[in-house]
Amino acid sequence: MGALSNLRVIDLTQVLAGPYCTMLLADMGADVVKIERPGGDLIRSNPPFVDDADEEAYGGYFQSVNRGKRSLELDFNDEDDRDDFLSLVEEADIVVENYRAGTMEKYDLGYETLSEHNPELIYSSIRGFGDPRTGETHRQGQPSFDLIAQALGGVMEITGHEDGPPTKVGPGIGDLFTATLNCIGILAAVNHREQTGEGQYVDTAMYDAMLSMTERAIYQHSYTGEAPSRRGNSHPTLFPYDAFETADGYAVIAAFGTNHWREVCEAMDRPDLATEYPDAADRLEHREQLREEIAAWAEGIETETLVDTLEGRVPVAPVQSTDEIFEDPHVRDRKMLVPVEQPGADETVEIAGSPIKMTETPPEPGRRAPLLDEHREELLKDGELEPADPETAADD
């Protein structure tokens, strides 16, 4: 039984941000019921597939963030389906949705309506620009995706090389970080309800989340009056803290402490640099010259040699490819690759595991994502929300 096995979540979300939030809850034991529009979540058909997209129920995108959930297909334009939805809400703890502001109200299924049916309900939304209930803005109602959030929130402006264009971060952090914050808000609301019996509205905006993530740029601008911009892989106030090209790849070195700096100088056989630049302020002032010294040393040796030379003495690591991540024993030891069934392919695939580790109630991300409408009979049996059976809920 997971830490959240007492919670029932009605999941109205699709694509990435909302499903990732509810996936975190499902991994920790919550019974997550994914309510899907007619035809299902928009990303069910997104690649990659193991072999045949026509035979497989969904691609890797959907599998990765919808594992461990139950599926029910409902059409909110249909009165009977709306009634079925309300019957589920009455027995639920949490509703999560990531529509544009005002969408649920069009079906008379907004927070105020649902809380009348279940006064202790926690209603949570993830939107590009938040909800008027928690702070009205002219941007609400506009569509938003990860790229939009990264652009507006300052992430792209401070990502990339100094002489290059603004660059998005590879993973969809506009979705994923927002989803994680929303999950924290939901759990805080659950704790509040335990103390007071009150439900409430939880709202997290992608723009707001990105601004929170770029906290360094915010305080730098406030303190100095200057707008930070791109610095490549370096740090604005710490040195050395950068990626360096080696003979066969790249390695990162974070040696901004004086003790670490001495170790780097020793490895480079340059004790003169440790003597000439003993203070962090000196090293920061002469960072360009010193970066060239380290770069010249690094490019003459292989990544493995560089890492082996400094590891244990200086924070250092190779820049790994995904192939190398799959081969790293740490990843297996920490159960960060999880095998799941791929319906229609007759084999298993691997998805990212849960980074949340707990000694008594460890998260269990091992059940595959549901087929569309797979759990209709068990969910609507006798008009009540039946509990999930962890042994059979995701079986064919």
Image (cartoon, rainbow, N blue to C red):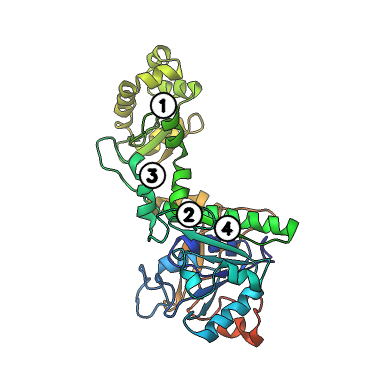
Q: Residue at x 43, y 18 (%)?
A: 281
Residue mark closest to the camera, 4 vs 3: 4
Q: Residues within 10 Å of mark 1 (few under 14, many from 20)?
A: few
Q: Is residue 26 left or right of residue 130?
A: right
Q: Is residue 183 left or right of residue 17?
A: right
Q: Relative to residue 155, is residue 383 depicted above or below?
A: below
Looking at the rendered structure, the kind of residue marked 1 is Thr
Real-space CA distance between mark 4 and mark 3, rounded to the nearest whole angstrom: 24 Å
Identify residue for label 2.
136
Name the residue: 35% across, 74% down.
Answer: 51
Q: Could you say where residue 217 lies in the image, as x and y percent from the top left?
A: 42, 36
Residue type, mark 4 in image:
Val
Q: Is residue 262 depicted above or below 295 in this figure?
A: above
Q: Considering depth in this image, is 27 or 94 the residue closer to the camera?
A: 94
Nearer-N-terminus badge (2/1): 2
Residue 202 shows which numbered tag?
4
Q: Amino acid at mark 2?
A: Glu
Q: Mark 4 vs mark 3: which is more N-terminal?
A: 3
Residue 32 visible at all = no
What residue lies at 40% left-to-right and 54% top-to-bottom? 138
Where residue 142 sits in the image (x, y, percent)? Answer: 38, 60
The residue wearing badge 1 is 224
Mark 2 and mark 3 lie on one chain; the one further toward the N terminus is: 2
